[in-house]
Structures are given as structure tokens and as C-alpha cells.
Amino acid sequence: MERASASPREGRVRWPGLLLAAALVTCWSSPASAQITAEAVPPLVAEGESVLLVAHKLPETLQVIYWYRDRVTPEKEIGHLILSSNQTVDGAASTGRETLLTNGSLLLRNASQGDAGPYLINVILADFSTKQASVSFQVLPPLPTPTVTSNNSSPTEGEGPVVLTCEPETPNTTYLWRRNGEILSDGDRLQLSDNGTLTLLTVLRADMGSYECETRNPVSTRRSHPLFLNITYGPDAPLISPSDTHFPPGANLSLSCHAASNPPAQYSWLVNGTLQAHSQELLLPNITTEASGTYACLAHNAVTGLNRTAVRNVTVLEPVTWPSVEVANTTVKEMDSVLLTCLFSGSEVSIRWLFNGQSLRLTDRTTLSGNNSTLAIEPVWREDAGDYQCEASNPVSTRRSNPVRLAVIIDPTRGSSGLSGGAIAGIVVGAAAGVALVGALAYFLYFRKTGGGSDQRDPTEHKPSASRHNLGPSDSSPKKADDVTYSALDFSAQRLKEPTSASPSPSATEIIYSEVKKK
Ligand SMILES: *[C@@H]1O[C@H](CO)[C@@H](O)[C@H](O)[C@H]1NC(C)=O
Ligand SMILES: *[C@@H]1O[C@H](CO)[C@@H](O)[C@H](O)[C@H]1NC(C)=O
Ligand SMILES: *[C@@H]1O[C@H](CO)[C@@H](O)[C@H](O)[C@H]1NC(C)=O
Ligand SMILES: *[C@@H]1O[C@H](CO)[C@@H](O)[C@H](O)[C@H]1NC(C)=O
Ligand SMILES: *[C@@H]1O[C@H](CO)[C@@H](O)[C@H](O)[C@H]1NC(C)=O
Ligand SMILES: *[C@@H]1O[C@H](CO)[C@@H](O)[C@H](O)[C@H]1NC(C)=O
Ligand SMILES: *[C@@H]1O[C@H](CO)[C@@H](O)[C@H](O)[C@H]1NC(C)=O
């Protein structure tokens, strides 16, 4: 109020005269002339902020602009502007926070709730007529920074309701809730109320996270600090990894246990009922068959007090021995029968038969018995001639026998049943190496003899490839000798055929054998 009392005495002295003049002229002012208007910018003002009361459509013949608070009386004058001198004079109602701008607008700073209005603008024109307009605004308190509280800061999953409150409660406020930054809306398990509460009817672990509330009124927006809602849960049923149940002797048995839990579960391992470790991982190096048994992982949540267990039955198993195919006679007459037996030792073994490197297709003439270890063919047809292998697998190993070649002596009384005219199946060759090896060696020999073709690869390159195709258990010397014999045969056959491609494909090799026999 200092500025109000310090306002020029002169201004006040002039008051009654001007007022009288204004009052007189008002009666005669023409209603046809344009009305002036006033506008508050902004219409809703935050407490402590400024508001500008803007006068619009001011006539050109303007002489004096008065601003009043509530009523047009001298004691309610905030101030006036004399346009001829551009002089502003404070009125009796000036608080020192108002400024009359030279364009006739009134600026009010540091608005408080009591400043809301109305404000009146009164202008005096050259002809002493007056025009008047009024304007009001609302002052809203700026919102305080809200705080989120929970009536249960660490609920357990399944509990409820849990109530989060955004405080303090303020009028003209809307509330917005966020969880981990995402805006929440009303839902099955979640209720939002107009007064700033969020109710979680039943808490789930998915409700865990940082909760924030945002308050808004027309003049301000405030966001709370996040409240972390910790939800204890679990342990869930543990999972043991890896999923293997069988291990070979000498392996390092490493099992890991995991159970979803908050706080994290404490783990222990029991082997055959005896406590083995207080850890999430169990490591037993270089195991023997004695390590077979029941492995139980126990997960414990110290807060919920709950325990969950998972059990794994572990078997330590010797790998199966290399199998071999036994047959009484590798040469059979067509329409006779043949019995192939797979010899091996081991447990939990399953047997699979291969014919010419492919899984054997069963027909109504083939019978498997003894858990597939015996293969009977009756009657034998010429198309049964070829390489037989058995493959023995148990959960820790898979091993394939050397091929045994079965030859069929053709019975002329039986038709050729769709075989190509020139082909004569069934070549007596006894136990032989894999066709791929034969092909690879032939390829090698062919190039050595011709002094190398366009393909200049180092012949030694083929050795690893050949041994990879060798499905037998060991490079026993008799078999090696066989390989060489057949390679030579195969090579001469290729020479006769004048091959364009030396690709050692198994089908090409089969045909080559037929040609040799024909000669
Ligand atoms: C008067 O001046 C103020 C500040 O310069 C401005 O914001 C306002 O719009 C002006 N009023 C008119 C009617 O031009
Ligand atoms: C604004 O007004 C309030 C009282 O309404 C006063 O306490 C405060 O000091 C003022 N602020 C300024 C910057 O003048
Ligand atoms: C939290 O408030 C809800 C609703 O009022 C009530 O049902 C619940 O028991 C309260 N929880 C605690 C831990 O006080
Ligand atoms: C604020 O709330 C009051 C009643 O609580 C109401 O009269 C007023 O109009 C509201 N203001 C706004 C801007 O909504
Ligand atoms: C807020 O609203 C909810 C429901 O709308 C009501 O249950 C609760 O009592 C209210 N809290 C306060 C503090 O008014
Ligand atoms: C078992 O672990 C030891 C030491 O870490 C290691 O030397 C050995 O090769 C592992 N054995 C197997 C079968 O992985
Ligand atoms: C694993 O155990 C066997 C006997 O059980 C032993 O002969 C071998 O040396 C052990 N290997 C290692 C790497 O400790």
C-alpha cells in the first residue's frame, strides 16, 4: 500500500470533478456507438502469477482510462491514464501490484484468491461521454507437489485391498496415476477415485512397480515422487536345467535350479534325500554310476515362508558298445530267408536299422524282434541286396555298426519286378566299407591317374572327408584292405563309363557295381 499512499495528492483532488463529468456524460452517451470490452488473460490465474486485463475496442477519441475494483467510486479506483500526457496516476484502491499500461490494459502481479474481481474499466472520450466494461478472473492456488502413500508398502501376492493415496487433497484437482511410467485406468482389480485414491483390490506380482500420481488443476500440474510398491511372491515351482536325465560316467554333472520368487529364493539341493549343497547350482565333477538317484531342488522364500520342490531322477549310464551286424551267410538265394542280428551291450538301448545308409523301410516281408535287435526278411527279394547297418542308441550315446553287404542270387522264376533292364542286383561282395568312402577313393585315384583334372584339389583333402563317412567304430586293418580292393574295382568301372562327373554319390556307386558284375 506504500505506492497508494505515495500517489500524487493531485490525482485524488481531481477525482470529484472528473467523476461528476463522467456521471453526467454517461446519461447522454449514444448506445449506437461500439461498446468497449475487457478480457482477463489468462481467465484462470495461478496464485502468485500475473494477470493482464486487456481493454478492447477503445474509441479513438479517448481522453482518460480509469480502472476500478468492484464499483465506480473514488475509493475503489486503482488508477487512471491520461492519454494526452501518457501519465498514469494510482488510485485509492491500488495495492502496488497493479500497473496501468500505456495501451489501457491493467497488469496485476502476484495474484491472490482475494483478487478475483470484478474489475471495471471506465473511459472518458473527447465529448465527455463515457464507456464502461467489466471483467473478472479466478485465482487458483498452485498445487503442492503431491506425495503417494500406501497403506501397505510390501503386500504379498493375493492380498488386498491395497490403497494408494495421493496427498494432500486439493480442490479443483484431477488425478492421473502412472505405474512404471504407464498411465493407469480403471479395471477389474484397480479402482481410481476422484479424490486421489487408487485401490488395488487384489495385488498380483504384475502390480509391482513405481507408482506416481499427477495432480492437475486449470493452472498447474504436479507430479509426485515415485512410490515403489514391492510385492512379495513365490517361490513358484522350481525348474531344474538342463532337462537331461541321463549322463555318462566321467561327466561333470551341473544342475541349476530356478524359481520365480520375491525376494529371491534360497536354494538347497538334496541328493537321495541327503542335503548336498546350499546353492542354486549343483556341480558334481567326474560322476560315476553311483551318482544315479533322485536330485531335489528346494526353493525357500524367507518372507512368505513358503517352500517349493522340484525333483529330477538322474541316471548315470555307460555308453552303448559299438554294435555289429551278424548274419549267417551274406549271400542268399532269392525267395529264401535271412536273419540279421545286431550285437551290442548296454542298457536302455534302442535299435534302428539302416539299408544303404537310409533308415530301413519295413515291408510285409521284414520282421523285427528282440526289441528290434533281430531283422528277419522272408522271402528275400533281389531288391533286398545291399548294405545293412544297425544303430544302437541309449540316452548318452548313439553308435552305428559297419555295414554288412547282403547279396541275393537271383531266382529266374521270379519276374524282374520293375528293375531296369540292364541292372542286375545283388553282387557278392561280403562286408564292405561305406559307399561314400569308395566313391571318395575312386575320385582320388582317378585324378592321380589322369594327372589331375581341372579340379586341382590336394588329394589328401579327401582323407578327413572319407573318414567322416566311415560309420564304423574303428579303422580295423582288414576293412581297410577291403576298401582298397573295392576302390580299384570302382575306379576301373568309372573308366569304362567315361564319367563326366566324379561326384561320389551313393546312387552312382550302386550303378557302377552293377556294371562291374555285368562285365
Ligand atoms: C497492451 O500491452 C500489453 C503488453 O505490451 C499487451 O499484452 C496487450 O495485448 C496490449 N493490449 C492491447 C489491447 O493491445
Ligand atoms: C505475493 O503475495 C503474497 C501475499 O499474498 C506475499 O506473501 C508474497 O511475498 C508476494 N510475493 C511477491 C513476489 O511480491
Ligand atoms: C488398506 O485399506 C483397505 C481399504 O480401506 C483395507 O481393506 C486394507 O485392510 C488396508 N490394508 C492395511 C494393511 O491396512
Ligand atoms: C473449483 O471448485 C469449486 C467448488 O469446489 C467450484 O465452485 C469452482 O467452479 C471450481 N473451479 C473450477 C475452475 O473448476
Ligand atoms: C475417496 O473416494 C473413495 C471412493 O470414491 C472413498 O471410499 C474414500 O473414502 C474417499 N477418501 C477420502 C479421503 O475422501
Ligand atoms: C569337467 O570339469 C573339469 C574341470 O573343470 C574339466 O577339466 C573336464 O574337461 C570336464 N569334463 C567334462 C566331461 O566336461
Ligand atoms: C574321474 O574318476 C575316475 C575314477 O572314478 C578317475 O580314474 C579319473 O582320473 C577321474 N578324472 C578326473 C579328471 O578327475
Image (cartoon, rainbow, N blue to C red):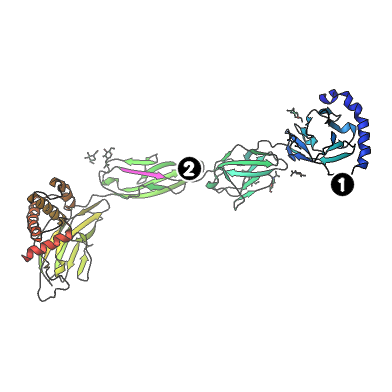
Q: Which percent across, then down, holds residue 209? A: 55, 42
Residue placed under numbered mark 2 in the picture: 301
Residues rendered magenta in the picture: 253-265
Q: For the N terminus, give its image quadrant.
A: top right
Q: Is residue 411 above or below residue 329?
A: below
| Residue 328 visible in the picture | no
Residue placed under numbered mark 1 in the picture: 32
Q: Nearer the viewer, residue 345 or 356?
A: 356
The 10 Å Cα crowd at callout 1, few under 14, some 14 to 19, many 20 or more, is few
Left or right? Give the position of 126 relative to 107: right
Q: Which percent across, then down, holds residue 107? A: 77, 33
The 10 Å Cα crowd at callout 2, few under 14, some 14 to 19, many 20 or more, is many
Left or right? Give the position of 165 relative to 285: right
Left or right? Give the position of 49 relative to 327: right
Q: Residue at x 67, y 41 (%)?
A: 216
Q: Quadrant of residue 489?
A: bottom left
Q: Nearer the viewer, residue 511 or 208?
A: 511
Q: Quadrant of residue 325?
A: bottom left
Query: From this viewpoint, which residue is outermost toward the left?
Result: 519
Amino acid type assigned to the residue bearing label 2 in the image: Asn
